[in-house]
């Protein structure tokens, strides 16, 4: 007879936390290998290719960094929201809204203003767009007690449709490859890239600043303190006199705004025009959730975590072509890693003892 | 004109079928208190499994059974994470979506572009299908439609008119009180998540072997997420889900019809989501307590917690 | 029940309990909170297992390992906090609890059965109403119906009248009388003497986990029971010097506060508190202390009346503004309200104070000051932890309490509202905290102390009020001889009118 007992574990050290993550990721990779095996692909080859393609060549690293930019931005913003137990799964929509606002600003003001002026402007516009889209669920939650999972999810779709409506309607410009989109953004609004790559460095610097900034915000400011208390124990928050509405509005504005930044980066840095939602963001808003989770909700770690998952995207894309695997393969990796991270979390917080008994 | 109306109704029923199946499943799941955001992924797994099995065996109904089994297996992950590990249900559900979409994409790759020789044919219900006008539209349809309707009504019956239904609902409303009366909360939750998963898989099966007869990556096209929204729109009631599913199915179809009229199809596509938000707002205005959501939806329950 | 013993983490909840009840009897179980009454009944109902001892039903020993078994044995329990699904209808709730509910159409089948019961006992419940629409008394009746439907011969009621109006109490008593006549037995847990004397045939008194007395109600009187419950002829131990009373600090004027269930938890309470004074509020937990403390500190709304600090009206101000006016609070439910469990110790050391200038400069927290502050609290209050970087949930309950108290005292508040500050602490910590409270008063503050521990009340307080069912039964100086009636007051049987206190002119 087997008896399994679980008890709370109290001494959680950072080292233990880190090691658990490592083990969980390792187990995840193992599981992924099994799936590759079942699909008739040599797992060792596939896994190693993923890493080689994304980190093993200069080109790969450049691509990885490019893809990491939005992940870091959004991931960092999510660490703040998740710490306050505000489940923001609307980062996709916030990103798109940021892209929309930025595009409008660029199209209308870009021709008359020099880069130095227009670039900060479009980033500001993007932040405002994302922040607005993030504040709506906050208001709905605090004032009307509506679950933010649903509202943020709905707003994703609403924004995606809104964007499509714009680019096939009033904002319709040149058609590219048979797909509608706006006209190209004015040159002054286009973000510069590092030579020989697609890394739009302005956004990259912004991402790192935001990561660091958020870290300071969460751990060193009164606001960050209040957000953490609210997430830990809302009752204690009430006792401590924390204003829930104000705190939620600010943190969702930040989280949404950062996603907005990411949107600006994608439009002004990579595509140079606004197209279908799927072309602007390939699921960054959702992948960023895992980024934040792996980073254990620490915005500074989101940099590493973001690079890691960007690497998986780049590597996954590469082996997709070379091994003929479908595009959704990356999703398997993401999904499995997240599952194993969840299980790792469980073992981190609970001591599990298995005992054998004679019947 | 007459032809247009009939064909619209027909296509509405078809469009609403997967929505109804998935929504019914999610309603059962959420009623027990577990939020399952993985519907999209499970649906995809169901679709690909049904397709593969149907293609290899030539029997669509085997495909259906296989899809259900696949849905069961995949949902087990979420059930385990949510009920036993007490993990965050939002994150676990999202992981399931990613995994499901990925697995289905991978499994289906060899089958892309190969149409089914044998698909699930439409079935005519005797007598009724000969009725003028609506006969063809409503009663000469895929078996999945009839199955969806039967299952939705059965789900309603289960929840409202049986002892098990009371137990399920109580688990979602107040697991502690339910446990005190000697009911095994964990078991009920596992069952509901798994059943919900099977229904979602059925919805996927409809897409691949009845609605169309081919497999394409991404064929679920966000229907899973709509089902999650519909669950709320239907206020967690399978009966209302029937109406909700076909209304939204109609919106899908209307998009194409109204396009020449100048109404933006995208605006129509927004409607399901906008209306969900408005319904929630309206209810919460009337009486915040009566949002009808199971009171303990999404919250972890530890046995014996004081 | 024979020789029942049960401990939780080394603390005896029940020790050597022997209890007997026969059919057609109503047995009262009397005692303060923490006396062990609920634990004992939970053992009988199968929620807990006794460490030792046995239970016999009709002479046969039985093992009750879960509630289902006790239901099958004919035992039913109505808990203090109802186990009902608020959003469901009455009949759905009954169907949930009934052991033989049919699978199909349970509502229809049960309706017939319930009709039979209702006529027998005159319940008059609308089966299709949702539970949240029912009054507390009606909800309780649903719980009773559930137990009767399951064929309970023995009914256990845990503090049944705590949520009822006087009218509903009368109706409950009627129901119980009829059940008794029918041959059922009832165990009636309560701390209210009037009811025990009124309803019960016999009464057993528990204190600190043991049986300290028992009698037939017609053989004893309230005074005797009160003495048994409280445990002593109240002796007056003046172990401290009485400080001269200063200016009026707190003035509470006729306030009314609503509780969680929608009923008034505090009714027409008025009192005044002066500088250098420790004012105690004695009473069994659940009589409005929590709501009163929450009202004064701003966590709960005050329906009518006023609260003033040093002449300033703080009625219904936000908790932070009240704190800024000099009112600190050590909450009754310390884990739930007093700390953020996942954060570090030094984070929790400033939970209520983080907006103060000394800890925050504009938007930033001055963590050096915070940590120094945390360190000084740990040293001064002897909080046992190896560092301030420890997660606070790793500390024992007693140490958490010491931290909370240290935190609230350290800012020299005008008024400290302390709710059951030493509950659950060991002897050393208790003594230590009490000394600090005295020290605080000597330094010019005042303390409003809510406590169930009469030792503590008499050791610390200058004056004491007794609260019962949301009202003050009397406010007395601790050296007043009428204090002997405190047991009666706590149990709601006696009211003492007091003259206003003579002091220095109010500011």
Image (cartoon, helix red, strand yellow):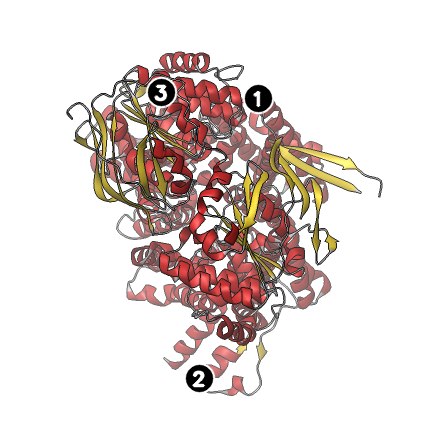
Kind of element beneath mark 3: helix
**Camera-side residue of C193 and B101:** C193
| Residue A359 pos. (x, y %) | 84, 44
Residue B203 seen anywhere in this rendered image of the structure: no
Residue B118 seen anywhere in this rendered image of the structure: yes
Q: Residues within 10 Å of mark 3 (few under 14, many from 20)?
A: many
When the figure is inspected, residue C232 is found, relative to residue C68, above or below; the finding is above
Residue with the mark numbered 3: C409
Residue with the mark numbered 2: B133
When the figure is inspected, residue B235 is found, relative to residue C369, above or below; the finding is below
Kind of element beneath mark 2: loop
| Residue C485 pos. (x, y %) | 39, 38
**Camera-side residue of C95 and C62:** C62
Distance from disc 3 to disc 1, alpha carbons, whole Å, reads 31 Å
Distance from disc 1 to disc 2, alpha carbons, whole Å, reads 71 Å
B267 on left or right of C86: left
Residue with the mark numbered 1: A13
């Amino acid at each position: 007879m087997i008896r399994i007992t679980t008890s709370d574990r109290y001494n959680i050290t950072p080292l233990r936390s880190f090691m658990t993550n490592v083990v969980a990721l390792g187990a995840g990779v193992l599981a992924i290998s099994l799936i590759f095996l079942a699909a008739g692909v040599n797992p060792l080859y596939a896994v190693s290719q993923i890493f080689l393609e994304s980190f093993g060549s200069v080109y790969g690293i450049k691509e990885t960094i490019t893809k990491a930019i939005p992940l870091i931005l959004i991931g960092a913003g999510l660490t703040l929201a998740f710490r306050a137990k505000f489940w923001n799964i609307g980062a996709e929509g916030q990103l798109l809204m940021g892209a929309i606002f930025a595009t409008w600003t660029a199209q209308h003001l870009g021709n008359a203003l020099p880069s130095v002026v227009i670039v900060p402007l479009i980033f500001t516009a993007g932040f405002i767009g994302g922040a607005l889209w993030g504040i709506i669920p906050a208001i709905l939650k605090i004032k009307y007690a509506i679950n933010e999972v649903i509202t943020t999810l709905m707003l994703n779709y609403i924004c995606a449709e809104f964007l499509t409506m714009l680019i096939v309607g009033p904002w319709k410009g040149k058609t590219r490859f048979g797909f509608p989109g706006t006209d190209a953004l004015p040159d002054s609004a286009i973000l510069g890239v590092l030579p020989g790559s697609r890394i739009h460095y302005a956004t990259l610097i912004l991402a790192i600043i935001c990561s660091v900034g958020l870290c300071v915000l969460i751990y060193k400011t009164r606001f960050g303190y209040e957000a953490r208390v609210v997430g830990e124990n809302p009752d204690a928050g009430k006792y401590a006199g924390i204003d829930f509405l104000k705190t939620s509005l600010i943190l969702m504005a930040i989280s949404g705004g950062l996603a907005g930044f990411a949107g600006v980066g994608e439009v002004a840095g990579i595509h140079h025009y606004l197209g279908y939602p799927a072309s602007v963001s390939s699921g960054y808003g959702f992948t960023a959730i895992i980024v934040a989770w792996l980073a254990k909700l620490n915005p500074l770690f989101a940099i590493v975590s973001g690079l890691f998952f960007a690497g998986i995207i780049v590597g996954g894309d590469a082996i997709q072509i070379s091994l003929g695997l479908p595009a959704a393969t990356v999703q398997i990796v993401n999904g499995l890693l997240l599952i194993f991270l969840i299980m790792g979390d469980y073992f981190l917080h609970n001591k599990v003892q298995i005992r054998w008994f004679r019947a | 004109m007459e032809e247009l109306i009939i064909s619209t109704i027909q296509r509405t029923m078809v469009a609403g079928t997967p929505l109804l199946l998935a929504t019914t499943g999610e309603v059962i799941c959420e009623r027990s208190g577990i939020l399952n955001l993985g519907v999209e992924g499970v649906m995809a797994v169901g679709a690909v499994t049904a397709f593969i099995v149907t293609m290899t065996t030539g029997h669509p109904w085997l495909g259906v059974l296989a899809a259900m089994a696949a849905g069961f297996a995949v949902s087990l992950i979420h059930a385990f994470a949510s009920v036993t590990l007490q993990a965050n249900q939002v994150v676990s559900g999202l992981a399931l979506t990613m995994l499901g979409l990925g697995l289905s994409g991978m499994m289906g790759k060899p089958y892309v572009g190969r149409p089914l020789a044998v698909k699930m044919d439409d079935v005519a219900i005797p007598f009724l299908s000969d009725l003028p006008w609506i006969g063809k539209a409503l009663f000469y349809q895929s078996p999945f439609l009839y199955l969806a309707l039967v299952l939705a009504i059965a789900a309603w019956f289960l929840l409202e008119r049986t002892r098990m239904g009371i137990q399920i609902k109580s688990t979602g409303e107040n697991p502690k009180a339910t446990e005190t009366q000697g009911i095994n909360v964990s078991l009920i939750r596992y069952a509901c998540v798994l059943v919900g998963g099977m229904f979602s898989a059925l919805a996927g099966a409809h897409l691949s072997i009845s609605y169309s007869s081919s497999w394409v990556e991404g064929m679920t096209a966000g229907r899973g997420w709509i089902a999650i929204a519909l669950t709320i729109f239907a206020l967690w009631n399978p009966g209302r889900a029937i109406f909700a599913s076909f209304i939204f199915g109609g919106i899908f179809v209307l998009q194409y019809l109204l396009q020449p009229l100048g109404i933006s199809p995208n605006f129509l596509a927004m409607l399901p989501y906008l209306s969900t938000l408005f319904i929630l707002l309206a209810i919460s205005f009337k009486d915040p307590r009566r949002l009808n959501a199971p009171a303990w939806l999404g919250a972890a329950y530890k046995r014996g917690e004081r | 029940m024979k020789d029942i013993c049960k401990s939780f983490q080394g603390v005896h909840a029940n020790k050597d309990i022997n209890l007997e009840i026969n059919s057609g009897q109503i047995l009262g179980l009397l005692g303060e909170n923490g006396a062990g009454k609920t634990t004992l009944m939970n053992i009988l109902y199968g929620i807990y297992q006794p460490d030792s001892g046995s239970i016999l039903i009709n002479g046969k020993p039985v093992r009750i390992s879960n509630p289902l078994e006790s239901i099958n044995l004919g035992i039913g329990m109505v808990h203090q906090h109802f186990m009902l699904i608020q959003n469901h209808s009455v009949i759905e709730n009954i169907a949930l609890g009934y052991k033989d509910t049919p699978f199909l159409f349970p509502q229809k089948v049960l309706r017939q059965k319930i009709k039979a019961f209702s006529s027998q006992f005159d319940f008059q419940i609308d089966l299709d109403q949702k539970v949240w629409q029912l009054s507390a008394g009606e909800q309780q009746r649903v719980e009773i119906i559930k137990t009767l439907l399951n064929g309970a011969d023995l009914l256990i009621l845990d503090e049944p009248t705590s949520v009822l109006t006087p009218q509903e109490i009368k109706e409950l008593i009627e129901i119980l009388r009829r059940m008794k006549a029918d041959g059922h037995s009832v165990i009636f847990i309560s701390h209210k003497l009037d009811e025990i004397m009124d309803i019960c045939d016999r009464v057993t008194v528990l204190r600190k986990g043991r049986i300290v007395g028992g009698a037939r109600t017609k053989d004893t009187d309230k005074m005797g029971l009160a003495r048994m419950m409280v445990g002593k002829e109240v002796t007056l131990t003046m172990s401290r010097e009485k400080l001269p009373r200063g200016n009026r600090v707190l003035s509470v004027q006729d306030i009314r506060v609503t509780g969680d269930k929608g009923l008034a938890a505090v009714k027409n309470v008025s009192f005044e508190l002066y500088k250098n004074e420790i004012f105690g509020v004695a009473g069994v937990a659940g009589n409005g202390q929590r709501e009163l403390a929450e009202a004064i500190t701003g966590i709960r709304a005050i329906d009518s009346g006023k609260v003033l600090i040093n002449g300033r009206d703080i009625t219904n101000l936000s908790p932070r503004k009240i704190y800024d006016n000099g009112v600190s609070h050590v909450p009754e439910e310390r884990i739930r309200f007093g700390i953020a469990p996942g954060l570090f110790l030094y984070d929790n050391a400033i939970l209520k104070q983080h907006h103060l200038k000394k800890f925050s400069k504009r938007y930033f927290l001055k963590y050096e000051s915070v940590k120094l502050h945390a360190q000084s609290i740990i040293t001064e209050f002897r909080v046992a932890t190896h560092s301030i970087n420890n997660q606070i949930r790793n500390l024992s309950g007693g140490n958490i309490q010491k931290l909370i108290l240290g935190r609230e005292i350290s800012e020299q508040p005008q008024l400290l509202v302390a709710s059951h500050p030493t509950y659950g602490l060991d002897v050393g910590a208790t003594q230590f905290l009490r000394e600090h409270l005295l020290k605080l008063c000597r330094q010019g503050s005042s303390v409003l102390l809510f406590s169930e521990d009469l030792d503590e009340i008499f050791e610390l307080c200058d004056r004491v009020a007794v609260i019962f069912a949301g009202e003050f039964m009397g406010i007395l100086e601790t050296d007043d001889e009428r204090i002997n009636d405190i047991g009666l007051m706590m149990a709601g049987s006696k009211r003492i009118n007091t003259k206003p206190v003579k002091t220095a002119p109010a500011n």
